[in-house]
Amino acid sequence: MICPACGVENPPIARFCLACGLPLADETTRDERRIVSIIFVDLVGFTARAEQLDPEEVRALLTPYHEQVRREIESFGGIVEKFIGDAVMGIFGAPLAYGDDAERAVRAALVVRDSVASGDLQIRIAVNTGEAVVALGARPALGESMVAGDVVNTASRLQSQAPINGVVVGEKTYLETRDVIGYEEAESVTAKGKADPVRAWVALEALTEAGRRLPGERAIVGRSPELQLFNSIWARVTAERHPHLVSIFGPAGVGKSTVVASFARAQRAEGAQVFRGRALPYRESGAYGALATQILRLCGAYESDTTEVIARKLHERTGELLAGSPVDPRLVAEHLGAIVGIDAGGGAADRDELFSSARWFIEAAARERPTILVFEDVHWADANLLDLIETLATQCHGLPLLLMTLARPELLDARESWGGRLASYTSMTLGPLGADQARELALRRLGDATRLDEVVEVAEGNPLFIEQLAATMEETASGALPTSIRGLVAARLDALPQQDRALLLDAAVVGRVFWSDVLTALNPDPDVERTLDELERRDLIRRDPSSILENQQQFAFTHSLIRDVAYELLPRADRARRHRTVAEFFERSTGSSGEAIGALARHWRDAGDFDRAIDQLTRAAEVAERGWAKDHATVLYREALELVPPEDSARRTQLTRRLALASAASFHLDDVRRPGSPPA
């Protein structure tokens, strides 16, 4: 691949130029519809100020400002799309989604507010979340526009009305982040081109550390088997004084943190000391970030303490724990300083010495009191931290010490042998809630059963999805999928290799159920079977034991939301092209059953070929009528009628008549089915 910016040749796997660092164009890149969060930062009164300055003086002011804003946005995982004079526009959620993009955008905005506004500059900032068309092959560094949509225009309008040195956000951003960001409601913004005023909130401060959530108030639902397993392991650890590593895997929102927090609360009440640390994918997260947090808490120190205070507490606590030990507490404290990211008086000669000091400190803490260390989100952890966790699990002996790691399944892609060398290791995958537990959680959140079945059906046992769907149904009239759920699922899809992801998007066009042959029709790839095996291993799809198409393996998405989000990523033109290919495949491969005709009709409709869709819908309705499914026939006739153009009066008259007859027959059938009705 030749870099268009500097002309250097790069290997095919390179996504960025190895010489200049700019993104490389890829033949497979295309437009996608994505949920993004846009951040606009603009200086206040700079135009008038610049009028009085020499151009070189203007540049001297703008350059450090631009670099500081860019640095803060990128440190949270966003990208800067453009600089427009003294305005900066950044994007979160594209080209990659992380699942918490709105939160990242607001946190970045707050940091920019505090850092830039602390000088002699004044700024206004806005963050807005919504759907946009994203050009995945665009190169913002070369001035190419990456996103388009109303979300961008609204963000610009909000920014112009933001308070000086303040951050204002739109409604979707507020709804997604209000649990972790403190807000006060602002006056609605009257934006040009908007029929209604835009609701707005002023972001005040972060309520939690990055990556953390406020503890939930509701009791845990279900998970009794998992809690029993944890309790059993902990009982053995304390009785036999034999350290153990437990790894809990599961997708975002399934409840890993919740179930471990419930277990930890119970053990803390019984006298154990529990410390939690989280690996972060952004900001200045050090190589040992999760362990660093735990070490600080073990020493009674906090990240907000000065370097001198942290160093003093490290030395004091290490001296207490290792008093009478054959190792030098002073050296251990100095090495721990390197782990927590400060200079505590010296450094380790090599990594083994650093790991040994960490082990001596943790062992001493566990001897003093039974200890549980919880490492969250280790799929984002640096390889050094993963090595250190395995070292602790392997080399610590004779101690009541439990190490618990929480991760998404992606960890095993990067670390296939995780836990494989350990004698005391338990791995478990946390699955969705059962039907009864899901209904209980949904009922608690909704307060009534009005839309209970709808929430349970869509969420399919994922506790976070249940919470988000219930909240959306309570607070908005929209039936759209909450952007936070779309973001979480999109982040999972973005983590896939390009070939696997492309195949999954093709499958989404076919439907919740699909077949390998139709995927080959969409994209003649000789590795289709291998890719399907890989997607099944990742628990995104599953093989069905039977198929409605002869001699063709049938697959299904493991979760309807995976299919829905994958489908929504495709622009309308790409969807229509794929639907046409699928319709042509079904015409060649299926018979004349009502189900096959109905599916074919909908693919022609979504392909934009309404004439063929009307014909197939009419055929499907006729089949339904012959089977005395009059109510289903009325649905199909109504769908067909909606596609007939107003000027085609003859066709409209014919379909209207058939719809009326089917509706009347359906009404009388209801009378017959009603208990106590006389026989027909």
Image (cartoon, rainbow, N blue to C red):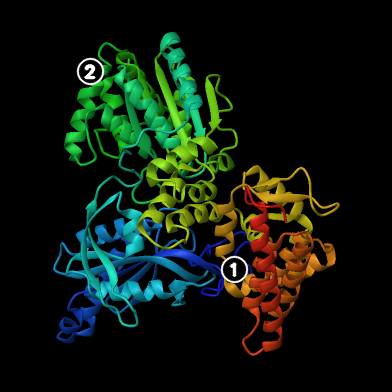
What is the crowding at mark 2: few (fewer than 14 residues within 10 Å), some, or many (at least 20)?
Answer: few
State the residue at coordinates (42%, 11%): 241
Amino acid on which the number 1 mark rests in the picture: Thr
Residue 491 position, x and y percent, is 50, 54
Counting residues from the start of the chain, the first of labels 1 and 2 encountered is 1
Determine the CA span between mark 1 and mark 2. 58 Å
Query: Is 84 placed above or below 283 here?
Result: below
Q: Nearer the viewer, residue 299 or 558?
A: 558
Q: Nearer the viewer, residue 20 or 273?
A: 273
Q: Which mark is residue 29?
A: 1
Query: Is 83 placed above or below 283 here?
Result: below
Horizontally, is 59 left or right of 567 in the view?
Answer: left
State the residue at coordinates (76%, 55%): 516
- Eye-nearest disc, 1 or 2: 1
Q: Which mark is residue 89?
A: none
State the residue at coordinates (15%, 62%): 118
Q: Where is residue 141, by image quadrant? A: bottom left
Amino acid on which the number 2 mark rests in the picture: Glu
Q: Residue furthest front?
A: 678
State the residue at coordinates (45%, 9%): 240
Residue 647 position, x and y percent, is 64, 90
Task: Kindly tell me whether residue 42 is visible in this rendering.
Answer: yes
Query: Is 322 placed above or below 670 here?
Result: above
Query: Is 322 placed above or below 390 here?
Result: above
For mark 1, give the secondary structure: loop
Mark 2, residue position: 320
What is the crowding at mark 1: few (fewer than 14 residues within 10 Å), some, or many (at least 20)?
Answer: few
